[in-house]
Amino acid sequence: MNIDGKPLVWLNAKRLRAHGTILAACLWSLYVWTLATPGLRDRNGNLKGTDFLHFYTLGSLAIEHRGTDLYDMSAQAALAAQRVPQSAGIRYLPLYPPHVSLFFAPLALLPYPVALALWWGYTTLVYGICCYSLWLACPRLREYGLLVAILAVAFPAFFHLIAWGQTSALALACFTVMFFLLREQREFAAGLVLGCLIFKPQLGLAAAAIFIGIGAWRILGGAALSAAVQLLGGVVYYGVEPLRRWFDLLRNIRAVMPLAEPKPYQTHCLRTFWSMLIPWPQFSFVLYLLSAIAILGLTIACWRKGSSAPLALRYSALLVATALVAPHLTVYDLVILAPAFLLLADWLLGQPSNSSTRWLGTLLYLIYALPLIGPLARWTHVQLSVIAMTASLYLIAQMSRAAGSEISGRTETSALRENAAPTRIRDA
């Protein structure tokens, strides 16, 4: 993605800035207009903050020490209607581990509108810090600060994150911090951060499989310790029963998944890609497993064979694989791809133009924008974003192996020259 416009004329900085500005203006002005109503219902009749009501209710349960109700939909609906009368009739499937409720307890002490405003502000701050930190780590993007900021604001996944009142900014923070720790070769600390994804375990599934595949035991040990400590915190506060019920829910997740995905066209992962395309659940699930194994195998090979390749490429492959393999990934979860966009753009700016780099630049553009037309999958039954992510992962893996081979070749040449130098001196 040469945003100077040389290899990819149509993806020049001016055009990207225009697209981002128009998109940001349309998305956010429409959202503000939708929210500009009296009361807590927007113009579409939805509760403002949507999913945040669930977290607000979990926090309320934590305050009242009602661990037995953490996985009781009826009890939570009744409590939500009591705390926020405008939410009467709204029900959520409780999927989060017990300790997550403790995180939201402070916000549940406040009136819902105040808590929602603070949560929006917190989410925006975390997202902004992550994007800014990654931009600083990308030297070739330094002169494009305004463009990066515009595209960050216009990112459809970020828009959905705010509109749904969801928690995916915390997952983005985990992946961002993990990148910097891996860059410093602090593997155990990176594992501790990876373990924090236990609050959304589907987002840690691919990383766990990849690190097992390459034998990164320090990372896995840190992740296991971190996850165990967090789950233990819930046990200390509530007792063992809520944790046991959460594990039971995970074991039966396929039976309740339709409740968690009332709008499957808003999901962007391999499982729902196949379930929308293939009308037979057992067959589509088998295709999901096979394609997920293939994606994980490709990414593991990328980390093994391209181990000397830039971390930016390998980590971007891990993030794309995370999105594809996750059994449940809604549009707002795509914010975890923000590091991949920045890292890959920075790397591509330093590469000569060829068909692979041009294709990857185009695919990044599509992955960024295609969630906007995700609802079309209601009729087409094809989620194009998943196809674009799969193609991009294939190219990233190819580039990682090529870059790793090139770096290894330069290292071997340098070593041969160093070893040959004394011989020349003796001959002289």
Image: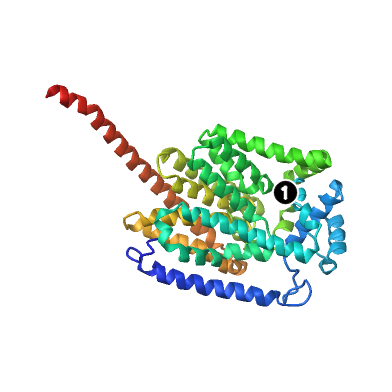
Q: Name the residue under label 1.
A: 253
User: Residue at (61%, 76%) from the top-left corner?
Assistant: 29
Under circle 1, the secondary element is helix
In the picture, residue 305 is in which quadrant?
Answer: top left
Please tell me which residue is depicted at 16% across the width and 26% down the height of the picture. 424
376 is higher (above) or lower (below) than 286: below
Placement of 241 over or under 119, stated as above or below: above
Q: In this view, does 45 lie to the left or right of 78?
A: left
User: Residue at coordinates 60% horizontally, 72% vertically from top-left?
Assistant: 28
Q: How crowded is mark 1: few (under 14 residues within 10 Å), some or many (20 or more)?
A: some
Q: Which residue is drawn at 88% across and 63% down?
A: 82
**Residue 196 in picture, x, y percent from top left:** 65, 44
For residue 391, say whether it is visible: no
Q: Which of 15 and 381 is in front in this view?
A: 15
351 with respect to 316 (left or right): left
- The image shows residue 106, relative to residue 117, as above or below, that is above
Please provide percent x and percent y for residue 170: 64, 52
As displayed, is residue 91 above or below residue 245? Answer: below
Image quadrant where one finds the C terminus: top left
Quarter of the image with the N terminus is bottom left
Judge by depth and name the residue closer to the eye, 55 or 68. Answer: 55
Q: Position of residue 188 (x, y in %)?
A: 57, 35
Question: In which quadrant of the rendered view does residue 231 lie?
Answer: top right
Q: Foreground: 98 or 261?
A: 98
Q: What's under tag 1, amino acid-wise?
A: Ile
Rendering coords of residue 31 (x, y %): 65, 73
